[in-house]
């Protein structure tokens, strides 16, 4: 019997990665020592279910077996003509590898390392890493390449991905449904479904902007019919990297799928000197037999940190760049009365910052706006029982700033090329230790001097002219530098991670939110280092439902920043959206308020206070539970259900009802059909009604919500509690 975790077959050439609901099997061929994927799917229980690895016979000389073989890490070399994961250049000019399995080890039954070695250049070693979560079945894969030479041997890496995943042909060779998350600024993570992923097809996603980007999220899901009744095989995954990335899906003529992903090959290059190693980012993936519904449960659950984030107020919408001490004190007073737990001062607080054209990089408080500094504001916020937060954009500088005038060479640039400004700013060269020291010193000083509990770390432009003066002095011919100048794309992200880790080490209680003009940097790599993510600058409730639908495929609810705002103020049509609807949309994750609460009427203040009280009562479910979408018709009605053992919260939305047709009964999930459940339902902030149903009734007949029959922007909150087992 196969236990949970990672097990090696007695022949030492088969490895079983077993979770509660899935199994992944790797095998090594005895002759050529090739590492192949043998199985990935529903859980297996016996080692004897999967035969030993062997290369299939070639169909013809035009169809080499190596090209179609499900290699765990296909490299450039020999008769491989498909997508490869690794390509190098040796000092001799040889541009191919010849890797073979030499060893393995298993650490704590959850981490497998398979070691490959070049058959001629024996100092070149590649280690394949596999880490499995037995609860969710998520497998983290990465690869490490080492130059173990003791001489001046230099190895140039031209391409290095994290992993290749292999899926068998579908039943009757039917097409798979591909789900991706695409968009743009203020329109992030929109669910895109492609149904024609069939034989002899390719599909590529990626970013070359230095960040994951709003244009495409590093995520995929492939769904097909299962051989089991009422089941759908779904393979899904995401790349944990906050820089350039790629995911490519290839379907061959037999219907076999290869999913390759990792660092973007465009403008990629690394040099490994003797004794150096490099490890790729993690490419995580999993399997569910429950379709997209199952995938949506597993990946966010795997990334869930298990802690509740505070209710936040951000003053940007109320103040913009025109911040001042009295205004912020007034906002803090009102926020505390509403029940806010974290008060955040956004952009505009530092020297010279009267618009987005100046000041970035000069992280000193503006004496005109805050004559005595920011500490009096932070002290006042703390005296009201709230935490204090501050906005930064540490990687950026405006040309109109003291920092840039003093250090114009501190930005990425090429001497022969113009410096392209985006949002009137340039990107600081994080590969420069002086730059990193300046950034960290200013962050550290402000945190300690002011008393900062939370940082919103923003990044409002992509990286361009990625020339680091430390990696390439622009005077030597290409290829003769000591380091490959293209390393800058990797070094920038690693230095960004280093700064985050340093902050968390020096200030263990500090909360950090990742932001990049909205959701441009909300990947699993940064999620492991921050407390929450800003998913979009667009806070219109109708837009936010679409964006939150997409990002919830990856982001745990507790890390999904969701704000109540007045957006869009310039469109009178949106004035009719009730405050209740705005709050209910923001209930879906970590609740925040961004409205100008100084303009709230007494009635609005009362309503906001009551919704915040309700959210506090329900947030152990809303933040820590599994978020599922029961309906996501953005023109008719949307329903989410967030579940923990014995409790759930249902959020239902009706954007419009032009024909006054009732919505169909909502069939709930994950309930005990024999149990009794108490449902408390809110349509207004000051009244609720209580009803009791069986689990079978709620799941099979469904819950009627007649309140949503007519009218636009209607919404309902339902708290579901198990009260008896029968």
Image: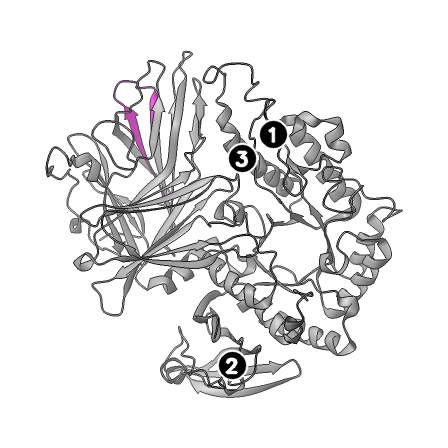
Q: Which quarter of the figure is the C terminus placed in?
A: bottom left
Q: What kind of element bears circle 1? A: loop
* Residue 298 location (% of width, % of height): 40, 58
Of 10 and 442, nearer the camera is: 442
Q: Is residue 245 left or right of residue 119?
A: right
Ranked by sequence position, the earlier of labels 2 and 1 is: 1
Q: Which residue, given by chain and number where applicable, does mark 3 sit on?
A: 494
Q: Residue at x 87, y 44 (%)?
A: 367
Ranked by sequence position, the earlier of labels 3 and 1 is: 1
Q: What kind of element bears circle 3? A: helix
Q: Which residue, given by chain and number where applicable, does mark 1 sit on?
A: 412
Are the residues flagged by discs 3 and 1 in contact, CB closer than 8 Å? no
* Residue 231 location (% of width, % of height): 27, 66
Tell me which segment is drawn in magenta.
111-125
Q: Is residue 304 above or below residue 427?
A: below
Q: Is residue 465 left or right of residue 318?
A: left
Q: Which residue, given by chain and number where applicable, does mark 2 sit on?
A: 657
Q: Residue at x 42, y 77 (%)?
A: 668
Q: Is residue 646 above or below residue 128?
A: below
Front of the two marks 2 and 1: 2
Asked whether 425 falls inside the magenta stretch, the response is no
């Amino acid at each position: 019997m196969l236990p949970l975790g990672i097990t090696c077959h007695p022949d030492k050439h088969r490895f079983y990665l077993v979770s509660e609901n899935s199994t992944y099997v790797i095998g090594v061929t005895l002759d050529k020592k090739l590492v192949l994927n043998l199985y990935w799917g529903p859980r297996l229980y016996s080692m004897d279910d999967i035969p030993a690895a062997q290369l299939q016979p070639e169909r013809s000389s035009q169809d080499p077996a190596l090209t179609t073989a499900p290699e765990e890490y296909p490299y450039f070399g020999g008769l491989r003509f498909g997508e490869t994961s690794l390509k190098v250049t040796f000092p001799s000019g040889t541009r191919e590898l010849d890797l073979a399995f030499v060893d393995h080890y298993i650490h704590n039954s959850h981490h497998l390392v398979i070691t490959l070695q070049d058959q001629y250049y024996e100092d070149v070693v590649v280690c394949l890493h596999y880490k499995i979560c037995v609860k969710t079945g998520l497998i983290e894969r990465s690869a490490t390449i080492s130059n173990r030479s003791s001489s001046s041997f230099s190895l140039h890496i031209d391409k290095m991905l994290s992993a290749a995943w292999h899926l068998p042909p579908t039943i009757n060779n039917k097409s798979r449904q591909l789900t991706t998350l695409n968009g743009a600024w203020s329109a992030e993570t929109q669910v895109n479904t492609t149904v024609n992923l069939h034989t002899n097809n390719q599909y590529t996603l990626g970013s070359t902007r230095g960040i994951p980007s709003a244009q495409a999220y590093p995520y995929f899901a492939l769904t097909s019919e299962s051989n089991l009744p009422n089941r759908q095989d779904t393979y899904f995954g995401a790349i944990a990297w906050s820089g350039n990335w790629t995911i490519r899906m290839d379907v061959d003529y037999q219907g076999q799928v290869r999913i390759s992903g990792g660092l973007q090959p465009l403008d990629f290059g690394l040099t490994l000197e003797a004794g150096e190693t490099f490890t790729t980012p993690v490419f995580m993936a999993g399997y569910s037999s429950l379709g997209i519904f199952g995938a949506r449960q597993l990946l966010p659950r795997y990334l869930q940190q298990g802690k509740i984030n505070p209710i936040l107020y951000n003053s940007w919408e109320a103040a913009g760049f025109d911040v001042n001490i009295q205004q912020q004190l007034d906002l803090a007073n009102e926020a505390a009365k509403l029940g806010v737990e974290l008060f955040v001062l956004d952009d505009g607080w530092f020297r010279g910052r009267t618009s987005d054209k100046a000041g970035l990089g000069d992280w000193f408080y503006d004496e005109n706006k805050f004559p005595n500094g920011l500490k009096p504001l932070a002290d006042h916020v703390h005296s009201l029982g709230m935490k204090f937060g501050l906005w930064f954009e540490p990687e950026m500088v405006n040309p109109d700033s003291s920092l840039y005038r003093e250090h114009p060479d501190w930005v990425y640039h090429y001497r022969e090329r113009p410096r392209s400004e985006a949002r009137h700013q340039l990107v600081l060269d994080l590969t420069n230790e002086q730059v990193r020291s300046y950034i960290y010193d200013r962050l550290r000083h402000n945190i300690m001097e002011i008393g900062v509990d939370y940082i919103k770390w923003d990044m409002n432009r992509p990286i361009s002219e990625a020339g680091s003066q430390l990696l390439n002095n622009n005077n030597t011919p290409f290829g003769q530098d000591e380091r490959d100048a293209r390393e800058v794309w990797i070094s920038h992200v690693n230095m960004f991670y280093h700064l985050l880790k340093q902050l968390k080490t020096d200030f263990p209680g500090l909360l950090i939110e990742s932001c990049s003009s909205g959701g441009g940097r909300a990947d699993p790599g940064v999620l492991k280092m921050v407390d929450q993510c800003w998913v979009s600058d667009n806070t219109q409730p109708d837009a936010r439902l679409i964006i939150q639908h997409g990002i919830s495929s990856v982001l745990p609810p507790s890390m999904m920043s969701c704000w109540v705002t007045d957006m869009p103020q310039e469109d009178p049509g949106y004035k009719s959206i009730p405050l209740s609807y705005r709050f209910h949309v923001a209930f879906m994750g970590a609740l925040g308020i961004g409205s100008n609460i100084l303009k709230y009427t007494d009635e609005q203040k009362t309503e906001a206070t009551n919704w915040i009280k309700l959210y506090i009562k329900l947030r152990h479910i809303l933040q820590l539970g599994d978020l599922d979408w029961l309906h996501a018709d953005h023109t008719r009605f949307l329903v989410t259900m967030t579940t923990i053992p014995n409790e759930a919260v249902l959020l239902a939305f009706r954007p419009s009802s032009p024909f006054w047709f009732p919505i169909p009964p909502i069939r709930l999930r994950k309930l005990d059909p024999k149990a009794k459940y108490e449902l408390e339902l809110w349509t207004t902030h000051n009244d609720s009604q209580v009803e009791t149903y069986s689990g079978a009734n709620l799941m099979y007949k469904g819950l009627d919500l007649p309140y949503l029959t007519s009218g636009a922007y209607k919404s309902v909150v339902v708290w579901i509690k198990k009260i008896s087992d029968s």
